[in-house]
Image: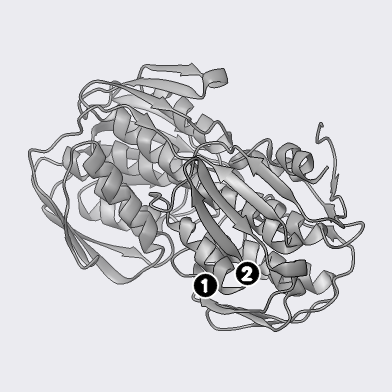
Amino acid sequence: MKLLEDYKVPFLTKKLDFTVNLPGSKSITNRALLLAALSNTQVTLNNVLFSDDSYHFMESLKSLGFNLTVTEELKKVVVMGEKGLIPRSRAAINVGSAGTAARFLTAMLAASQGEYEVKASEQMQARPMKPLLDALRFLGVVFETSCREDSLPYVIKTAGFKGTKVKIQADRSSQFLSALLMVAPLAQDSLTIEVEGDLIAKPYIIMTLKMMQYFGVKVENQSFQSFLISQGQGYQGRDLQIEPDVSNANYFWAMAFLTGGRGKVSGITQDSWQGDIAFLKVLEKMGGRVEQHPDGISLEGPSQGLFPGIEIDLGDMPDQTMTLAALAPFAQTPTIIRNISVIKYHESNRLQAIINELGKMGLETEELDDGIIIHPGQPRAVAIETYDDHRMAMAFALTGLKVPGMIIKNPRCTAKTFKDYFQVFEGIVK
């Protein structure tokens, strides 16, 4: 199936029963690429995600002089670590629309020595960077912006970090803190990172800390408010089998949930490094039944697809807001989602996008200070605007399974993290 235009979602009248294999985690892939490049020897990464975001990350590393051997058909990348050094002291990279590449590589370059130009797509130019840039400026790094202050694109001029303590705000993106944590071992002195204000999406910080430890760097963590990275540590090269992407797996478990059927995602365990595994508990509270198997996790939906709404704080897994919003119209009571203000600053203003698209379907929503109330109803078929946002496209395809004639516009935007999403989706349904 080739996605040249809009995608008409198949209307489903049966229960699903399927097993699916999914690509590797975007969050783990891009962290692993960075840590492998900074390690002391060759690292082999298996089950690598090949998507727009990871392509930009890999091409950026190549532009910086790193040696990568990429075998896409085997989902394998071999990275030659350079012991914490950047091979080229002057280079230009393009991070595209990849937030992880933009934040992580900016911090890596800032912690090195040289002059680097960082380019990005218009979408990424509109996303927040100021908290990270402010922290890096405090450490002595100079940024020359060519469009808007505190936004991409820019030129980084650096002689490494100057200082032993820095503060950072992480209430709009945990990636700012993850970026600083991962490059802290490059500093000449021990570095303490203090979090100002609230820290969102804490599970992503836990993932970062676990991956740093896997590659040989320990962080002293004081209640997620202060982090000490002691001088003298360096990343040790270790091969890594990357987990399937749990953020994407939730769409498929939600498919089974919505139809009262059963779906198994292979290769995932309950002790995943990825925080979005907790969304399974949300589906359980709404009537789903989860089972761990030796080869994956299955979810069976409630009988006849009938389920209650839920009041839930999704602050630790904001990417799943769209998944729950896509199910909410079919609940028997309202759904209340809290602590998700951060999604206004993702690939799109996701909160407004949800309100817009559910409104087009004839559904009532109420915006809260930090979230949304979605009232159940009978959605009407519309063309879903995806705002060039992969998660809007993937999530609202779920709603279309229960509404004859629903259209997803610009389905190719899923290439950001899962280019074959609709092919896999269609194969399960048909």
* Left or right position of 322 against 99: right
Q: Is residue 3 above or below residue 310?
A: above
Q: Is residue 133 above or below residue 201?
A: above
Q: Are marks 2 and 1 in contact (CB under 8 Å)?
A: yes
Residue at disc 2, secondary structure:
helix
Asked if residue 132 shows in the view, the reply is no
- Tag 1: amino acid: Ser
Asked if residue 121 shows in the view, the reply is yes
Q: Which residue is mark 1?
A: 341
The image shows a total of numbered marks equal to 2
Q: Position of residue 142 (x, y in %)?
A: 29, 45
Q: Position of residue 9 (x, y in %)?
A: 84, 51
For label 1, the crowd category at 10 Å Cα-Cα, with few meaning under 14, some 14 to 19 and many 20 or more, is many
CA gap between label 2 and label 1 equals 8 Å
* Left or right position of 113 against 329: left
Looking at the image, is mark 2 or mark 1 earlier in the sequence? 1
Please tell me the numbered disc located at residue 353: none
Q: Is residue 259 above or below residue 30?
A: below
208 or 96, nearer to the observer: 208
Q: How is the image coloured?
A: one colour
Q: Residue at x 31, y 55 (%)?
A: 206
Q: Residue at x 48, y 30 (%)?
A: 47
408 or 214, nearer to the observer: 214
Q: Which residue is mark 2?
A: 351
Q: Position of residue 379 (x, y in %)?
A: 85, 71
Q: Position of residue 221 (x, y in %)?
A: 18, 60
Residue at disc 1, secondary structure:
helix
- Tag 2: amino acid: Leu
For label 2, the crowd category at 10 Å Cα-Cα, with few meaning under 14, some 14 to 19 and many 20 or more, is many
* Left or right position of 286 against 185: right
